[in-house]
Amino acid sequence: MNYAPSVGVKFNEDGTVRRFPGNTFLCHVDKTSPVYQEVLWAQQQLKAMKCATNYAFLPESSMHMTVIEACATKFVQRHIGVQN
């Protein structure tokens, strides 16, 4: 099976979250906004598709938009050649 690039980095093959140190700026979706209901609807549509097993879905309480993926330790270490 071909996995998304974040599998093995941010997520395990079973969809569970891996430790991923770094700094990310995000914005939670306001639960009282119309956008929140649209996001939930879109997620439900994706979950109903045959390809849903290829996705790791966020719980409703964690709906957010990544604004800036700043400094991901793993990628910085690779760039400058640091080993764990």
Image (cartoon, grey):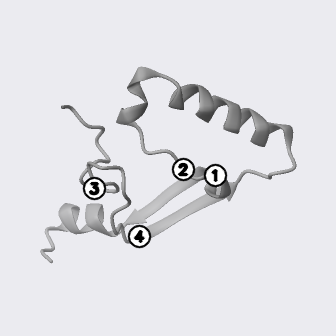
- Against 3, is 45 above or below? above
For label 3, count other residues whose C-alpha is less than 10 Å away and answer few (under 14), some (14-19) or many (20+): some
Type of amino acid under label 1 = His
Q: Is residue 47 left or right of residue 73?
A: right
**For residue 79, which quarter of the picture?**
bottom left
Q: Position of residue 45 (x, y in %)?
A: 59, 26
The disc at residue 58 is 2
**For residue 9, which quarter of the picture?**
bottom left
Give the residue pinned by disc 4.
22
The disc at residue 9 is 3
| Disc number lying in front (2 or 3) | 2
Question: Does dot 1 land on a helix, a strand or a loop?
Answer: strand
Quick one: quadrant of the N terminus?
A: top left
For label 1, count other residues whose C-alpha is less than 10 Å away and answer few (under 14), some (14-19) or many (20+): some
**For residue 39, which quarter of the picture?**
top right
Q: Which numbered disc flags the more N-terminal residue, 4 or 3?
A: 3
For the residues labelled 2 and 1, say whether their Cβ atoms are less than 8 Å apart: yes
| Disc number lying in front (4 or 3) | 3
Type of amino acid under label 3 = Val
- Against 78, is 48 above or below? above
| Disc number lying in front (2 or 4) | 2
| Disc number lying in front (1 or 4) | 1
Type of amino acid under label 4 = Gly
